[in-house]
Image (tube, helix red, strand yellow):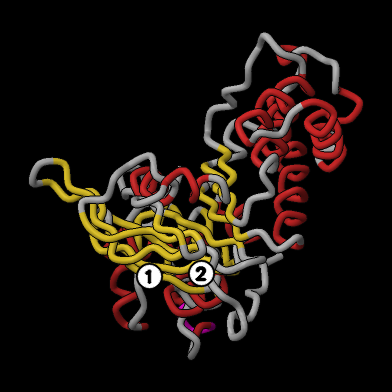
Amino acid sequence: MIAVAPSHSTSTAVLVAYDLWKLYGDRPVVQGVSFSLYPGEVLGLLGPNGAGKTTTVGMLYGAVAPSRGFVQIGTTTVQDDGRSARARMGIVTQEDNLDPDFSVIENLIHFAHHYRIRGAAARRLAGELLAQVNLQDYANHDIFELSGGLKRRLVLARSQINQPDVVFLDEPTTGLDPDARQEFWKLVTELKQRGCGVLLTTHYMDEAQRLCDRLILLQQGQVIDQGTPIELIDRTVGKDVVEIEGVEESAVQSLANQAQTWIRAFGSGYLLALPPMDSHLLWEHLAALNPTRLTRRRANLEDVFLRLTGSVLS
């Protein structure tokens, strides 16, 4: 399943990043990154390790000062009025950073105090948020009693205390088992349906393809491509690819050159894009090489990264 991008024709961006640069000394880590995020949209920020994702996200919510450029949440510039801007944000970092001295519901109640929500109002809000993430039965549990997936849900609930316009999800499902990831995906979809703008970083390509309306691909601190998952796959790779093992690289390269398609090392073999014309002929020639494995499948986002960066995300 691939997300369908919402229409932006009548929407005002909830977040605008303009010409973001970050230099450490003379070394640029992020270079000229610009984009907008809209209500009810999940925007994925993807790239290999060292691409500048963490630094970019840090600039978006004010943890990192840009060397150039700015970020706006609504009409508030993050770098000029971080406090007001952060009042409209929800942040889910890679670390749970929950307080082990408090119970599940107490974690939310005490966090609400940061937004001057106290007493019965804080307890009522905490109960509502626990119900939204299906944690109401764990309200009085200690934090150490929760599984990794339940902790992720609690952190997401905490990010909603201030009813934010923008939610940052920084690799939110890393380390979760498949069932917990699926449950978290449902919660992200509900955020989108409620009109939140969601900025997601992830190493899981199935997650990006499932959740994101648009993707921005980073490499060495620069945007190298962007678009919907379908657009990126079709434009960069095509409809189908072939995985082949147990043959000489020179033989596969020769066939790829003849078919005017691209080839990349992939696992213990090679990956080729099937051209739209005469794909059956290339398949027959590859089969004639007597490979130990020859597989045809639909192209995906992992293939996009392999094509653009020469590596896969892991």
Q: Nearer the viewer, residue 104 or 223?
A: 104
Q: Residue furthest top?
A: 101
Q: Which residue is rendered at x = 72% and y = 54% of the image?
A: 191
- Give the image location of residue 68, x and y in percent: 22, 57
Total labels drawn: 2
- SS for tag 1? strand
**Is-magenta flag for residue 282?**
yes
Q: Nearer the viewer, mark 1 or mark 2?
A: 1
On the question of residue 134 being in view, the answer is yes
Q: Which residue is mark 2?
A: 241
- Give the image location of residue 188, x and y in percent: 70, 51
Above or below residue 103? Residue 277 is below
Q: Which quarter of the rendered picture does the N terminus lie within?
A: bottom right
Packing grade of label 1 (10 A; few <14, some 14-19, many >=20) is few
Q: Residue furthest bottom?
A: 277
Q: Nearer the viewer, residue 231 or 294?
A: 231
Distance between the alpha carbons at the discs numbered 1 and 2: 20 Å
Amino acid type assigned to the residue bearing label 1 in the image: Asp
